[in-house]
Image (cartoon, coloured by chain):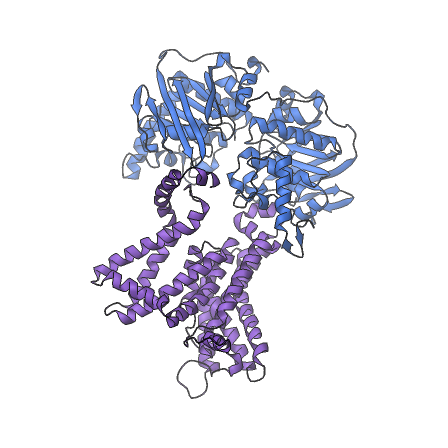
Amino acid sequence: MDKASLPGHTTATAPTATVGSVAVGMHGIEKRFGAVRANQGVNLNVATATIHGIVGENGAGKSTLMSVLYGMYQADAGRIAINGAAATIHNADDAIALGIGMVHQHFMLVDTLSVLDNIMLGAEPHWLLSRADKATRGQLRDLMQRTGLHLDLDSLVRDLAVGDRQRLEIIKALHRGANILILDEPTAVLTPQETAQLFEVLRGLRARGTTLIIITHKLKEVMGLCDAVTVMRAGEVVADMPIAQATLEILAEAMVGRKVHIGRDGSVGVQDGAVLLQASGIGVQDALGVARLRQLDITLRAGEIVGAAGVSGNGQSELLDVLAGLLSPDSGELQVMAQTFNSADWLDPKTARQLGIAHVPEDRHARALVMAFAAWESAVLGYGHLTSYTTGGWMHHSAMRTATRDMMEAFDVRPRNTELQSSHFSGGNQQKLVLARELGQAPTILLVGQPTRGVDVGAIEFIYAQLRAMRDAGCAVLVVSSELDEILALASRVIVMNNGRVTGELAIDDCNETNLGLLMTAENV
Amino acid sequence: MSNTNMPKWAELVVLPIVCLAVALAVAGVVVALIGQDPMEVLSFLIYGALGTARGVSYTLYYTTTFIFTGLAVAVAFHGGLFNIGGEGQAIMGGLGTGLVALWLSPYLPAWLLLPLMLVVGAAFGMLWAAVPGYLQAYRGSHVVITTIMFNFIASSVLVYLLVNHLRPVGTMSVESVPFEPSANLPRMHEALAWLGIEWPASPLNTSLFIALAAAVAVYLFLWRSKAGYNVRAVGSSASAAEYAGINAKRHIVLAMAVSGALAGMVGMNEIAGVSGKLLLEFVSGAGFTGIAVALMGRNHPVGIVFASLLFGALFQGGAEVAFEVKGFSRDMVVLMQGLVVLFSGAMIYVIAPWVAKPLNAVLNLFGAAHAKGA
């Protein structure tokens, strides 16, 4: 993939008004948690008015480093200089006073308050709210004018789209005087269009002299947006270069420590396998009466991977839940394994598993694992009915632990500690554990939501290989992903979802980013 | 849960001891402020609770009730439910135990009657908790509210029955007639006498063994049975439980039912073991103390047994201090108990970093071997 074809890429480089001056200098940062050395002698230099990417796998230490900069952690050793002056940062207030702002991956907003109230919260200029309101309103009008970031100050946060919420977070930081802005995984929750808009905003801020640090593991975004990039692995900086010297391959290899291949492989699976699952006329309304799925039909065949592409929130999640038995549709019919279900008597998750449907849910934290459970307890979730695990209501702990150990071995889950709490594994290792559990009982139908969300590059390659192996073993696989690259790398056949409908179905060879993008975003469907 | 990097053993052993010490130190300051000698009070407290066979017996008698109510709170907690209704469930359990004893003690032998009293007492407590459980699961009425309400109802039901139906004609005191001897659980000193061991008479009775067996049963239920696994899954993550095909509603009712059954067994200690008749106020706040016990025992049966022992010792030792030290009222005892709950329950994560830092420094001195194991 060459740089010029990246969405939203512009060839303009940073303004050079303050060439050479360093906004953020971190030298020899050490931070350990117990026996874990999260940062080891990390050096970071970010030039003023540039966009600096920090990439690395989960657990590489990039978030720790930024938390040290933002005052949430204290470094065990090392020096920090902000705009050339030595700084000690004990807490976030110190950081804000130094002009450092942070936009967290999970937004820190009060849903029931207005945009204005959220911006003022904790920084009210006057104890009388009406005065504070007035003063802040004036300041914000100037700020919005200057930055081109516009938001309706009086709308409630809960009514804002995700992209607007992020914009709000940015305005909030700028309003508090940030000229160094840290963004943690800013595009994780954004649609491609929102991502493009965000990048425009960030470039605009850079042009006005704001220094931006972006934590991410999406390398294409780094290539398209950043001026310089620092790669971290296992708590150390392994590469640090201006973007002109970087390529996707160099960065990926630096992150993982070996060569990786995550594009398409040769085979695309069988074309005309037996139909294993057929759903027709599926309609789902949410609690507010809004239609989430409209008369949707889908067929899954043995030996193929169906990729469901679409902008998040167009019914993909509901489709997965319906097929997995977690959500009863209001209309429609499902045929699976010679059994027919209708909307009045839909299958439940237990029945689904017994029929050979395995489900890797989109939301790993809420659904796939019980975060408070030990790894082995999470590794049997949903499979308590297996006779090898239980007899007469009693669980066989040793059998469960052995099975978990085997899963960890087969799917390279690290650390190989069956007793470790599920929440203490990194995202990639959690996902591998879930996949190991779901693939372990040789399902005939596999439903996968966002297979690699929050997963690092090294694990992505492995997960793709596992999904392809299931396909080759004759399983019908449905992959829902908001990453177009992922769909293109995995699918045999692609369906595009838009506004609760399937708006297009294409063989993989007919797909490209342009025609899929058009189907995903077409209006009036 | 905590962000302190402490080895597990330190979190389970060192931390509670430090918390207890802090609580006692603060209590000591208060004692000094009212003009008493803290060391004198403390020595009376410890001696009164643990210094004599009689003191130990009373301590264990209190412990028994706290184990039941503490386990009750813990089981509900693992199901994600805060059962405030241990008090009412214990009252209803005692009522069930007492009614069986009143009606059947003339006819049934002890070996048949006592198990029956246990089962009916547990069943009464179970029902009294299952109703709020059902309302929570299927109607969304919050279990904290409903169980509090049920406490009032239970205590009123008991008063009504005692005053209007169970009180013998012509007596003024609000209590039933004494049970026949077959309904009395053997006292510990009687049981020990059969074994040829001499032990002073005390309210301590063999229901202590029922309590310890209940602790083992709770462990087996929560961590060894599929139903317990399901309860914990529902309690930790309702959405993950749904994904796993676990019926959350049914397991909420189950957790409350088991919780109520445990609280309902209090009657075996207080009614069958001690009073030998049905009376008012036999629970007297133990249902609420159970919350503190569960908190301190980290909702684990082993922790709960030890926390119950501590609270039993505080009750007995406190009573002894109030008796021995002039000007030291029962209210001071309650204050000390409150401080223990405050520091070992609510403040544990405030104290944890203070413990972690010096502890880790010491561990590092002895080499990194420990830290690696953590």
Residue B257 in picture, x, y percent from top left:
55, 62
Is residue A188 shown left or right of residue A275? Answer: left
Count up the numbered dots: 0
* Above or below for A142 versus B357: above
Q: Residue at x 39, y 20 (%)?
A: A211
Residue placed most toward the observer, A132 or B190:
B190
Q: Quadrant of the C terminus of chain A?
A: top right
* Above or below for A450 versus A228: below
Q: Which chain is blue?
A: A
Of all residues, the one furthest to the left in this rendering is: B35
Is residue A496 shown left or right of residue A3? Answer: right
Q: Does the rendering let one see residue B138?
A: no
Residue placed most toward the observer, A482 or A24:
A24
Residue A99 in picture, x, y percent from top left:
33, 25
Residue A3 in picture, x, y percent from top left:
55, 14
Q: Does the rendering let one see residue B233?
A: yes
Q: Quadrant of the N terminus of chain A?
A: top right
Residue placed most toward the observer, A292 or A404:
A404
Residue A107 in picture, x, y percent from top left:
45, 34
Q: Residue at x 59, y 48 (%)?
A: B241
Q: Colour of chain B?
A: purple
Q: Quadrant of residue A140?
A: top left
* Above or below for A77 versus B328: above
Residue placed most toward the observer, A143 or B201:
B201
Q: Quadrant of residue B2?
A: top left
